[in-house]
Image: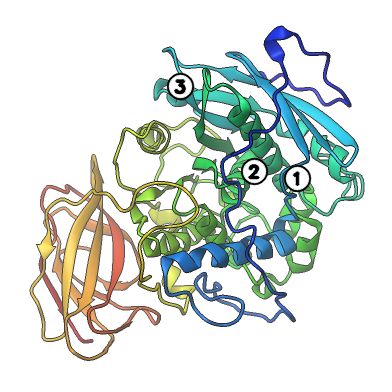
Amino acid sequence: MAVSLAVAALLPRPGAADTLVPVAAEPGVEDDGADCAVPDTGALTSVSRLPDPFRKLDGTRISTRSDWRCRRAEIRELAERHVYGQKPARPESVTGTVSRTGITVRVTHQGRSASFSASVDLPSGTGPFPAVVVLGGLGADTSTIKGAGAAVISLDPYALGKEGTSRSNKQGAFYSLYGSSSSTGLLMAWSWGGSRVIDVIEQSDGSVLRADATGVTGCSRFGKGAFVAGAFDQRIALTMPVESGSAGTGVFRGIPGESGAQPLSSAYSEQPWLGDAFGSFTGSPATLPVDTHEIVGLVAPRGLLVMENPHVDWLGARSGSVAALGGAEVYKALGAGGDISYWSDVQDGTHCAARPEWRTPLQQNIQKFLLKSGSSSGVFRISPAKSGDLSAWRDWQTPSLADGGTSGGGTGGDTGGDTGGGPGTPGDYCTATYRTVDSWSGGFQGEVTVRNDGSGALDGWTVGMTLASGQSISSLWNGRNTGTGGAVTVRNTDWNGSLAPGSTTTFGFTATGSSSTVPTTLTCDRP
């Protein structure tokens, strides 16, 4: 979609219909942990497995949901220091206009100014409408977005941060304000621009676009940008990165070992997408004190739909599935396990194609998080060809956080998808309970909850279940399975075998076959 943007020192003198409005006195919260003190990480050490998202920099683990606010601030700061570069706080002045066809933005900070604009394409109806910011226009299914009832805001990332420049001479609106030699990479510059668009929407009279219902999406390099935008602005209700590849959602620690995936050194040098500091980690990602499963966690508990392509090895979809599975543990801990979806099980291998498999989840996520009229639960459809094993990447357990009230915006918890199942047969030590998370033609996603029903600690568990004729497990996470059809045994991993009395853990799987008959004869016992 054509996008009209301009970067200039000054906007033309506004007419009566384009009056510039000062920043709202009570805007939405872009970063609710800005007041949290974040200590220095000190000397970095090599850690081959994924960092524990629940362990604070002082070495203690969070125990309540309210603790997540400042733990989130730590992860955000680590990502800025070592991966993306700093995202500055809201500039001194952001003004602009919103109309039914476009948005203008003018930013002034410490004597410097820049401006840019974006086009607006409204769905049918009278509004005001929720909106999805589409970065770059590449690969976004704008017809489905509009058909679901959301406006499309087409934003050109290159007006904010241009590609094809050296790291010492970055160009675009962001660098006009913060200097061409800024160590902040393009992905964060694009994220910053999306935030300034939201500033202007907040200032408007609300007759065209709703300030409380904004999403973001993009594909390939713009999928990387959409991922960063959603992670670093808590006003974004729905984040939808598409085929983001290396420097996108895929865990940095996994990329070097994934055959055919774009090397980190290539992603760093191809364009200044990542911050300058990341150059020190391209050959040693294990020394990073943060990884992308924690960036996924920054989005929690807000809506997240990750769409990936397993047919192009360069995109590193296996590492992406590990990040999504790891980040989903943050969602679960916050009581929002139904608010994250991941989908790489697609037939067409064309990069950045509008895929029929994604239309329904797109519609459902827009309805739930932007229109606030849906209650569908998150789904994981992982391609068997690029299925990551989270258990091989972590040695930490997901805590049962004590209090209610998630922080960081967003709505809802794990709202549904339960069909059939129910409690399994209790053993002397534990119980296994099954639920169907989602189903589709020819397949379904299931989840089994293991609960320690004994009076003492449980050190390891084994679940037995029987799949119906025609059903076969295609991928399984958070457990190790023996067999894929008929009688299947699932054992704990190294990190989720120890359960205190009354505590639970889960493992999930996708399977082929009909979901009308759920797995039966569930048993749970010690190994």
Give yes or no for contact between labels 1 and 2 (Cβ–Cβ under 8 Å).
Answer: yes
Residue 437 locus on image (x, y percent): 25, 52
Q: What residue type is labelled 1?
A: Leu
Q: Which amino acid does label 3 sit on?
A: Lys
Residue 91 locus on image (x, y percent): 76, 41
Q: Residues within 10 Å of mark 3 (few under 14, many from 20)?
A: many
For the point 39% across and 38% down, which residue is it?
365
Q: Residues within 10 Å of mark 2 (few under 14, many from 20)?
A: many
Quarter of the image that includes the N terminus: top right
* SS class, disc 2: helix
Residue 466 locus on image (x, y percent): 13, 66
- Of mark 1 and mark 2, the one earlier in the sequence is 1
Q: In front here: 70 or 320? A: 70
Per the rendering, the mark at residue 25 is: none
For the point 20% across and 49% down, which residue is it?
513
- Which residue is disc 2 drawn over? 225
Q: Which amino acid does label 2 sit on?
A: Gly
- Of mark 3 and mark 2, the one earlier in the sequence is 3
- Which residue is disc 1 drawn over? 186
Q: Is residue 139 visible?
A: no
The colour scheme is: rainbow
Position of 210 with respect to 366 (left or right) is right
- Which residue is disc 3 drawn over? 146
